[in-house]
Image (tube, rainbow, N blue to C red):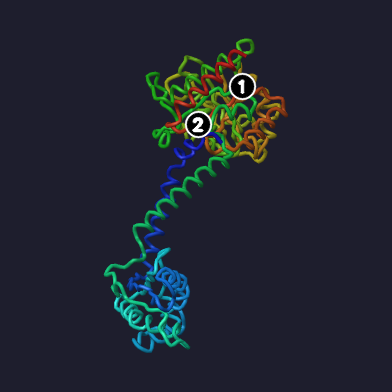
Amino acid sequence: MEIRTYFRALKKYWWVVIAATLLGVGAAVLVSQRIAPKYESTVSFFVSTPTDAAGTPLQADQYATRRINSYLELLTSDTLARDIVAKTHVDLSAEGVKKTITGASPPNTVILKATVRDTSAPRSLQIATAIAEDFGPLVTDFENRGSAKATVALKVTSGPTVDSSPVSPNKILNYAIGLLVGLVLGAIAAFVRELTDTTIRSTELLQSLAGFPVVGVVSLEKSARKKSVIDDLPVHRSARAEEFRQLRTNLQFIDAANPVKVIVVSSATAGEGKSTTAANLAIVFAEAGQRVLLIEADLRRPRLAEYLNIEGSVGLTNVLAGQASIDEVLQPWGRGGLSVLTSGSIPPNPSELLGSPSMTELMVTLTARFDFILLDTPPLLPVTDAAVAAVHADGVVLVVRYGKTTRAEVAMAASSLVSVEARVLGTVLNMRPADARSKAYEEFDHNADAALQA
């Protein structure tokens, strides 16, 4: 995984990182609020051994140093805990008192420090005071049993004192940990999502999977969310309109020796924008002064009549059934030479109807009357209608939706077209985010040049 892949993942899924970070900080805040604050009291002892009891001063000091580990164990003993409970009458058991006490000794010293942590500051100080008063005599008693002379002595050097501010939880530290953990988990989630994303997000990947050139890249503009069909005025110069004009040009010159006149527009699955692509492509063809016919050959879930705001109850199926003539159902649209043939009544057998001799005869008639014919067909993977309709066309354009169509779907759709020996003109990467425009153009220009040169 290259460095730029990491940066691309962070840029693409920045919202995942932000969400994880907020969750991490939120969890830290919640935990910090739920943890009861603890207060700390301390008392320090100096451990000494009389010289005459342990030999030379050096030997006495070494003896005291070695004994400190034993005193640390004694500091958390049941004996001391029971003495503290009996003396102070704190509302804790001996076991509870033991849990509040910890001991430590700096290396190579004879200093012993007792620390008491408790949820109550007064109780913490009370226990520490009892340790200061009782621990020295307790150690002396254990050391001097059976001995006539005192061999060890503990003297309080500091404390007992209590910190007025709670020592835990450390909210600043918790928040920092929550922030760091959230950032790391968010970044990991972004990387995993990038690595496991099987959708199409580049023209290079689309071309390698489909095996056909990418003849167009269409952006998803904000205006397209409200109005999917571009204006048919020649002065319309939005980036999306220019992309459809570029697609028109590429289709016109993709094979000068075998120019296309009838084009099937389809996709792998539903929701990839094939109908709007067919409609907008027909509009820009008509804009160039061509006589263009847009046929709504999706006889299962027709959408063109709705997109173009025209009547769709009578159309292709009625002509094929002999219920109406072609001139009775053709509808002009816009200011150019665009005519629309809607689907008409929904039939029970769409694929059989599209492959019927009546459809073949109709296409021969229409081809003689129009310069370009575009057929909007159902998706390739759910049904066979598009593959059947491809028999009547000079070529097929496969629409692929950016970030939705998977690699497997593209491969299966391309395979289904190859299996019926359809002439695939190329693919269109549709609904590409506007912020990916510059990179997509670089890839598209390179691939388009290669396709045209071939």
Q: Residues within 10 Å of mark 1 (few under 14, many from 20)?
A: many
Q: Residues within 10 Å of mark 2 (few under 14, many from 20)?
A: many
Residue 325 can be seen in this image: no
Residue 20 x %, y %: 44, 51
Name the amino acid, label 1.
Leu
Residue drawn at (56%, 20%) of the image: 447
Per the image, the residue denoted by label 1 is 425
- As helix, strand or loop, the secondary structure at mark 2 comes to helix
Disc sitting over residue 402 in the figure: none
Give the quarter of the figure containing the C terminus: top right
Residue 164 x %, y %: 26, 70
- As helix, strand or loop, the secondary structure at mark 1 comes to strand
Q: Quadrant of residue 33?
A: bottom left
Choose between 43 and 268: the one closer to the eye: 43
Choose between 96 and 444: the one closer to the eye: 96
- Nearer the camera: disc 1 or disc 2: 1
Q: In the drawing, does residue 107 fall left or right of residue 382?
A: left
Residue 220 x %, y %: 45, 32
Residue 129 x %, y %: 31, 80
Choose between 127 and 373: the one closer to the eye: 127
Position of residue 232 relative to residue 306, above or below, is above
Give the quarter of the figure containing the N terminus: top right
Q: In the drawing, does residue 380 fall left or right of residue 144?
A: right
Q: In the drawing, does residue 318 fall left or right of residue 83?
A: right
Q: Quadrant of residue 212?
A: top right
Q: Quadrant of residue 229?
A: top left
Badge 1 vs badge 2, beta-carbon distance below 8 Å: no
Position of residue 440 relative to residue 141, above or below, is above
Name the amino acid, label 2.
Thr
Per the image, the residue denoted by label 2 is 276
Residue drawn at (45%, 52%) of the image: 181
